[in-house]
Image (cartoon, grey):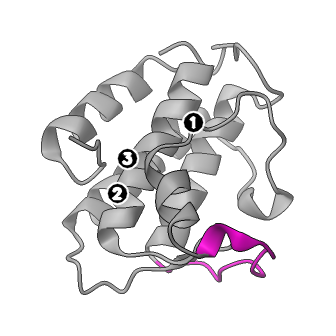
Amino acid sequence: MRHSLWDDVERMRTLERLQGVTPGTRPRWGRMHAGQMIVHLADQLRLALAEVPMPKPWPGPAKYQPLRWLLINVVPMPKGSRSFRELFLTPAGDFARDRAALEALLARAAARGPEGPWGGSPLFGRLSREEWGVLGWRHFDHHLRQFGV
């Protein structure tokens, strides 16, 4: 079974794990601090919800099947690789407020039906609700593991 942020049980587990991150939680790898990770995940949900303009598409084959499916569903997200600056739209602010905003975005995204509108990814192009759920879960899991929760 594939994990998805739209599955109620998986989403609740993810929210519980988020509670384990504090402003002082240190990453196991990478340069982000906990506050930056929280707003980075929120920015991904804003892209999914089409609430922010999609950054310029990145060139490459990731938007074509079957590579797209493999990258969204199977290939592990690399630890410590540098992400694209365009995926960091919001500066970290008050940690509690940022985490509450992330939780609200997650609830809104989970409540949105498949008809959308759903935004796109600069790497993968337009994504369906199902694809965003899987990619979102994997992205959240990657960063929560980065912070040891």
* Left or right of residue 26, residue 12 in this image: left
Q: Secondary structure at mark 1?
A: loop
Kind of residue indicated by mark 2: Gly
Q: Residue at x 37, y 75 (%)?
A: 128
Picture coordinates of residue 145 (x, y %)? 53, 21
Observer-nearest residue: 132 or 88? 132
For label 3, the SS is helix
Q: CA distance from mark 2 to mark 3?
A: 15 Å
Write down the region rendered in magenta: 50-63
Residue position marked by numbered label 3 in the rendering: 103
Which dot marks residue 133? 2
Compute the Cα span from label 3 to label 1: 25 Å
Residue at image mark 1 = 76
Q: Residue at x 60, y 19 (%)?
A: 147
The kind of residue tagged 3 is Glu
Q: Residue at x 32, y 33 (%)?
A: 15
